[in-house]
Amino acid sequence: MSKIAVNVIKLVICVVACLGAGFIGSMFTTPAIPSWYAGLIKPPFSPPNWVFAPVWTTLYILMGVAAYLVWRKGIGEKRVFNALILFVVQLVLNASWSLFFFGLKSPLSGMIIILILWVLILLTLIQFYRVSRPASYLMIPYLLWVSFASVLNVSIWILNPA
């Protein structure tokens, strides 16, 4: 198999894995939007519900490309391997947030998860920077969005005491 074909396969795997995490999260999110989430008091800066799907889809694609840029540097290299392990851990936590916030209907649990997620994204971005600067730059929109989502999650928790 040619090097180009191998790289295309790696890129597809990375993007599909990230979109897959989003799909898993959506299984908890989608049913809760018209019911539980609709009944929550939200801060005035809360975006309309339709914004979330295109934003997350774009972010998952950027994350997948970032992971690919790191992977193509050689998974046998320790810094590449460690960066990708950290990436996978934060991706699992990303999908877990939807389970805790929407699935368990717990803004408090969601807040705890998203704050840990934010730290892991930052650490991943730093590790990616050491391997591939373009990969780290592709993670910046994700970090910024999760920063916003963290503030939104904390606000919802404050506005909706259990």
Image (tube, helix red, strand yellow):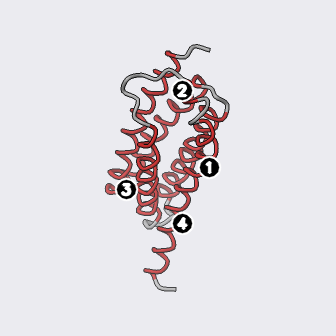
- Residue at 39% of width from left, 39% of height from top? 145
Q: Gap between marks 4 and 3, in whole Å?
A: 16 Å
- Residue at 39% of width from left, 34% of height from top? 47
Q: Which residue is mark 4?
A: 13
Q: Which residue is mark 2?
A: 111
Q: Gap between marks 1 and 2, in whole Å?
A: 19 Å
Q: Gap between marks 1 and 4, in whole Å?
A: 16 Å
Q: Nearer the viewer, residue 58 or 130?
A: 58
Q: Which residue is mark 3?
A: 135
Q: Gap between marks 3 and 2, in whole Å?
A: 27 Å
What amino acid is found at the position of numbered circle 1 in the picture? Ile
What amino acid is found at the position of numbered circle 4 in the picture? Ile
Residues tagged 3 and 2 counted as in contact (Cβ below 8 A): no
Q: Nearer the viewer, residue 10 or 86?
A: 10
Q: x, y (%) of residue 74?
A: 47, 66
Q: Which residue is mark 1?
A: 24
Question: Pointer 4: residues within 10 angstroms few (<14), some, or many (20+)?
Answer: some
Question: Pointer 1: residues within 10 angstroms few (<14), some, or many (20+)?
Answer: some
* Mark toward the start of the polypeptide (3 vs 1): 1
Mark 3 or 1, closer to the camera: 1
